[in-house]
Image: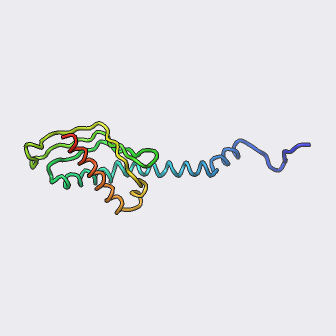
Amino acid sequence: MSLHSPEHNVNPRSWIKALLLSPGMLFLFGYLAIYSVASVRMNGTFREQVQQRYQGSSGNTHTLTIGSIEPEFGMNAITLSRVEMTPTEQCPQNLRRHISVKKLALAFPELEKTLFSRRKLQESTALVCRKIRQMETTVQ
């Protein structure tokens, strides 16, 4: 007596298809897609907005340059690489100091919401600028 049905042949192709369409794999692919979009957005629009906002928030005394921004896989923190704060001509002599940081890790709650809301993106850039400003004052 055989449990194998001649009507339903089992082949590797159907097993692979079933595996790829399983809920766990679909969730993984969806999460990786959101993570990839977050990474692209962090290194594009978000990085430019942080650099522009920082210069305005510092009273045009320093310019900020960020090499790259990497979101943590858990989407609850970001790592800024190659952060440089360069004094401008408006910077007072006693504050003129070039600050360079290789890596700066920042807690970043609700990172995924910056992908879908312009308001949340602006709030997040302000938050990052404040944290960088705090780091700058502790270094000086």
* Residue extending furthest toward the left: 93
Q: Which residue is pictured at 32% across the width and 59% down the height?
A: 123
Is 56 on the left-hand or right-hand side of 9? Answer: left
Q: Quadrant of residue 113?
A: bottom left
| Residue 90 screen position, x and y as percent | 9, 49
Quadrant showing the N terminus: top right
* Residue extending furthest toward the top: 102
| Residue 14 screen position, x and y as percent | 70, 46
Q: Which residue is pictured at 13% across the width and 46% down the height?
A: 88
In the image, residue 98 above or below residue 53: above
| Residue 112 screen position, x and y as percent | 43, 55
State the scheme by which the image is colored.
rainbow
User: Foreground: 57 or 69?
Assistant: 57
Q: Quadrant of residue 119?
A: bottom left
In the image, residue 109 above or below residue 70: below
Q: Which residue is pictured at 19% across the width and 52% down the height?
A: 55
* Residue extending furthest toward the right: 1
Q: Which residue is pictured at 41% across the width and 51% down the height?
A: 38
User: Foreground: 31 or 10?
Assistant: 31
| Residue 79 screen position, x and y as percent | 35, 43
